[in-house]
């Protein structure tokens, strides 16, 4: 019995690029970076892209169109979408836009255990994060402004979304920093021990 293909941002990106035109993996990676899609799609490891291409080919979503041979360049394989791949690319895009999914990023996971640090240590880490968030917002907004000079808004929407999320996170971090500084948010190890149920063997 064939396994269900596990969709991912990288898989969708490959299908979406091949939806535009047949291309080889190096060009896919180059376009993802040039369009700023590497803000939301991890293409740092080229091996990951080749592995995903092989999986998509095994699933019947893409196929080899031709192998290009040039005396001055390494051999390159040109891929194209199959009919099945075109349909699944549209299905995934619709579903990923319309249906929220539970994701598990590192930051809220770490915040859920921030009591281990103590108020002063937590405050210090949040102050460090605040500066980095501010720098990241500046960087993304500068990239958006640069991209807007030659790209339509529809292909920059993910950057708008990321900037909005970062600004919301920055506002929350600043609010918690203020509560920590004022003493409105505080705790102690002894106080927290009172919430730990006693260990019992079953």
Image (cartoon, rainbow, N blue to C red):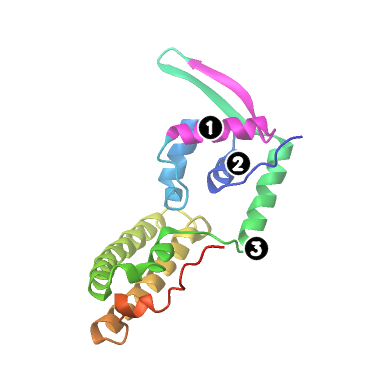
In reply to whether residue 63 is colored magenta, the answer given is yes
Single out the residue that lies furthest toward the right: 1
Mark 1 and mark 3: Cα distance apart in space: 28 Å
Check if mark 1's residue and mark 3's residue have beta carbons within 8 Å: no
Mark 3 and mark 2: Cα distance apart in space: 19 Å
Left or right of residue 113, residue 155 in this image? right
Residue at numbered disc 3: 98
Q: Residue 158 placed where, x, y %? A: 48, 59
Question: Who's the residue at 52% across and 30% down the image?
Answer: 24
Q: Secondary structure at mark 2?
A: helix
User: Which quarter shows the N terminus?
Assistant: top right
How many residues crowd mark 1 within 10 Å: few (<14), some (14–19), many (20+)?
Answer: few
How many residues crowd mark 2 within 10 Å: few (<14), some (14–19), many (20+)?
Answer: many
When the figure is inspected, residue 194 is found, relative to residue 52, above or below; the finding is below
Left or right of residue 145, residue 103 in this image? right
How many numbered circles are shown?
3
User: Which quarter shows the C terminus?
Assistant: bottom right
Q: Residue 13 placed where, x, y %? A: 55, 45
Answer with mark 3 or mark 2, whichever residue precedes in sequence: 2
Question: What are the residue bounds of the magenta stretch?
Answer: 46-69
Tell me the number on the disc at residue 51.
Answer: 1
Q: Secondary structure at mark 3?
A: helix
Q: Residue 35 placed where, x, y %? A: 44, 48
Question: Who's the residue at 46% across and 49% down the image?
Answer: 37
When the figure is inspected, residue 124 is found, relative to residue 66, above or below; the finding is below
Left or right of residue 46, residue 178 in this image? left
Q: Residue 66 placed where, x, y %? A: 60, 21
Residue at numbered disc 2: 15
Of the residues tagged 3 and 2, which is closer to the observer?
A: 3
Of the residues tagged 1 and 3, which is closer to the observer?
A: 1
When the figure is inspected, residue 197 is found, relative to residue 61, above or below; the finding is below
In reply to whether residue 128 is colored magenta, the answer given is no
């Amino acid at each position: 019995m064939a396994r269900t293909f596990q969709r991912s941002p990288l898989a969708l990106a490959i299908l979406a690029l091949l939806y535009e035109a047949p291309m080889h993996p190096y060009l896919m990676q180059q376009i993802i970076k040039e369009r700023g899609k590497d803000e939301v799609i991890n293409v740092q490891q080229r091996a990951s892209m080749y592995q995903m291409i092989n999986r998509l080919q095994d699933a019947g979503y893409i196929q080899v169109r031709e192998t290009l041979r040039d005396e001055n360049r390494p051999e390159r394989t040109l891929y194209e979408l199959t009919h099945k791949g075109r349909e699944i690319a549209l299905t995934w895009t619709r579903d990923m836009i319309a249906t929220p999914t539970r994701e598990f990023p590192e930051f809220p996971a770490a915040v859920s255990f921030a009591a281990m640090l103590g108020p002063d240590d937590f405050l210090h880490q949040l102050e460090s994060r605040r500066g980095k968030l501010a720098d990241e917002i500046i960087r993304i907004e500068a990239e958006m402004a640069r991209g807007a000079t030659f790209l339509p808004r529809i292909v920059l929407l993910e950057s708008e979304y990321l900037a909005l999320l970062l600004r919301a996170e920055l506002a929350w971090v600043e609010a918690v920093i203020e509560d920590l500084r004022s003493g409105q948010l505080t705790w102690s190890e002894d106080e927290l021990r009172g919430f730990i149920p006693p260990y019992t063997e079953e």
